[in-house]
Each structure stands twice: as C-alpha cells, then as structure tokens.
Amino acid sequence: MSQFIFKMPDLGEGTVDAEIVAWHTKPGDAVTEDQLIVEVMTDKAAVEVPAPVSGRVVSITGAPGDKVAVGSPLIVFDVGEGVGTNGGAGQSPSAAPASTSPAAAAPSAAAAPSAVAVPSAAAVPSAAPAPPAPPPPARQGRVMASPANRRRAREAGIDLSTVVGSGPGGRILRDDLAAAVPQSAPNRTDVSRADVSAETSEIKVIGLRRLIAERMSEAKRTIPHFAYVEEVDVTELESLRLHLNLSRPEDAGSLSYLPLVVMALTRVLESFPQCNVLYDAARGVLVRHRAVHVGIATQTPEGLKVPVVRNADSLGLWEVAAAIRRLAERARSNKATRDELTGSTITVTSLGKLGGIASTPIINAPEVAIIGLNKAIERPVVHHGAVVVRRIMNLSSSFDHRFVDGYDAAAMIQALKELLEHPATIFIPKVTSK
C-alpha cells in the first residue's frame, strides 16, 4: 500500500491557516480525482477543496470548526492497487510508503470496509413481498450545491449524489432536499433547521457565520459609529428608473435603485474624498483612494458577503447594474473569488422591500463609511406648499467618527440627497473652475 499525504494548501496571500467548514468524505470512502472532499474558510473567502488524486481515504485532520495550518497534513489517501482508483498509484512525488506516513497506524479496517453478503434472487421465497424500488443511481461527477444545503443534507442523512437538482446547471436547491426525504421515514429530519433534542438545539458557529460575528464585533468594539438618517424624495428617481427599464438594452436586467445610488455616490465622493478612505490601524495611516470601489452588501444562504464593484466611478449606469447583478449571483452561488470579495473603499447596503423606516448599518472595516437604503414608500408630504403623495425613501448611514466629522457626514448625505432628488444631475459632468 502506498499513501498520498495531502496538506492544507496555501489559499492566498497572508493565509496561515484555514477553518474546516464541512467534510464531504470520511475514512474508508473511495474518492476520485477532483471530487469535492472538504470546504474550508479563510479570513477572506470560502473555498471548496477537490481531491488531488483517486484513492481511498485513510484519515482526515480536524472537525468542522477546527483550524488547520497551511502545510499541515489534511487528508491521507491510500493510492495503492486494488482500492478502486483510476490508477496513478505511486506516481505522485508526495506519495509515501505506509511505513513512513504519520497515518500508517490507522486501522486497516478504515482503508477497506468489510464485504457484506447479499442473498441471490433464487434464495428469496416466492411468497415474499416485492422488494422496494432501488434507489436512483448515484450522480457521476461533481455535485452542485451550496455549503448550507450540503450541511442540511448531512443532517438529514441524504446522499446528494442521488438528488436531482432543479437549479441552474443541475444545482441542488433546498426544495430538492425536502422532496428527497421520504415522508414516511421514521427518523425524518427537517432539512431547514438543525436537529432538535428535547426543547433546544445547538448550532456550532463556524465558517462564514463565525467570520461575520468576529468582524462585526471588532467593528462595533473599535469604531465609534456616527449614524445619520435623512429622508429623500425619490419620486423623480422612480420615474427615471421606470423610463430606463422600458428602453433598457436587450441583455440588461430590470434596473433597481441600487445602481443609481452607486452612480450618485461616486459623484458625491469627488467632493468628500475623506469618506473614500481605508484606515490602516497597524500603521496609524488613512489610505485615501482616487478610484471608488463600492462594496455591495449581499445576503447569501451562507451569510452576508460584500462583493466589490471596482472602479465604479469609471463605469456607466448599465455597466454598474450588470456588475452588481453578476457579483451578487456569484456571491450567492459561492463562486465569488477572493479578489471579488475584497478591496472595497465604501459600502452600500440595502434590505430591498424589507428595508424598514431606518437602520444603523455597521461599518465594513477598514472603511470609514457605509450607506444604507431603506424601503421606498408613497406617503403624503408637503411639496411646493401643497399636500401631495410622493415616493419617499430614507438613507441610513454610519461614519467612523474618528476620521469623519459629523458636519462632513451630514453634508455628504445632503449632497447625495440632492442628486437623487434631481437624478438628471447624476449624469451631468462636473464643472471645475479654472
């Protein structure tokens, strides 16, 4: 028997370890090259790690929630003959004889599960009831599913390779999991929540949810937030949005307020560069950026992610809208890269139809400002001396009061309000005095 020791790979600059989020294999399992074996989380992104070789799993390192250092053994494969691999035993320079591997002491039973005798059809009495229908054949190749749905499947005891996905490209959705659980199963588990024991359940805080918790706690602990809420009459903005949607390019999706707000924000930051800043706490330096890289807070099945529209100040409206849609979809499908999830200089967040009246968004450190969109509703207001129905939306913003004075924060939001209430001015080039 020869063994292949796969070590935790280097997942990016500055990464020294990664957290185990979920294992998709266990000792004794036969895996094929490129099959998903484990999901890990760094401080920057979630990463799905495929098997580097075909073979049988001898041992794994770490349970969900544990951190494994880069370069440390992560999983040991038996790549010898007779283990159902696609060949290649002993071909990798990383393969080592069992006597030299730290996992050589693993019980042989883990590498080769015992055979189970199956009675032949002739041995079944003719009076016996018809056997149940065989399970659907296992899917070949990689199974497409989000980490959250993979976790639900494990909790419900569902083999994802037997589930037919109804999402794009055969991706398995939550409804597909619910349909895969037999209603009459005695130990049926609700795939929408963790197993409940008595009156309580325990859910370990790991992966992206742990990272979000740490970052939010750090931001609130170290940044003195200054909140500012202003109402904006978006009646004209709504009229422009509807008009643009009627004449939008064929390949463009429906326009929301978000791209228009991003466009207005890039114009406003020309006059308020102190809000397009990152604070380097280690050096005690404010890094002011010329380009505007807008983070778009996006809710995903795994938690809140912030993909980045880079150089938003140099893009047109439809380019911004397309970038937001593309990045949001990549974030929700867990396909966003590290570069797409880092490098923002200011963040915009929106709860859409759930936006409420006001909110107090938490700053996405090391940024110094965040702008939140609340729900736009029609209500009676005094307009030009008469009570009329107008469409009103509140902007809820937070600023790092160490570096952005209250006056400057209020002035910036007022400038943003002015552009949104007169949206044609968003697209008029700024006139600079000579």
Image (cartoon, grey):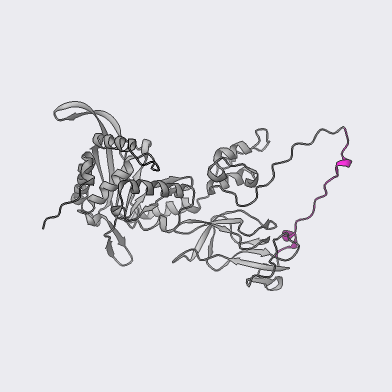
- Residue 359 in magenta stretch: no
Q: Is residue 285 above or below residue 155?
A: below
The quarter holding residue 73 reads bottom right
x and y, in percent, of residue 338 in the image: 44, 58
Q: Nearer the viewer, residue 131 or 17?
A: 131
Residue 10 shown left or right of residue 384 in the figure: right
Instruction: Write the start and end of the magenta stretch as one range.
Output: 106-126
Number of marks in picture = 0
Q: Position of residue 329 (x, y in %)?
A: 45, 47
| Residue 378 drawn at (x, y percent) | 28, 29
Relative to the observer, which residue lies in front, 320 or 223? Answer: 320
Residue 286 on image: x %, y %: 27, 62
Q: Is residue 125 magenta?
A: yes
Main SS of the magenta part reads: loop
Residue 104 visible in the picture: no
Residue 388 visible here: yes
Question: Which quadrant of the structure image shows residue 32?
Answer: bottom right
| Residue at the left extreme of this rendering | 434
**Quarter of the figure with the C terminus:** bottom left
Residue closest to the far top? 387
Q: Residue at x 32, y 63 (%)?
A: 281
At x 69%, y 42%, the residue is 136
Quadrant housing the N terminus: bottom right
Q: Relative to 276, does residue 253 appear above or below in the rendering? A: above
Asked whether, in this view, residue 217 is left or right of residue 143, the answer is left
Q: In which quarter of the view is residue 81 placed? A: bottom right
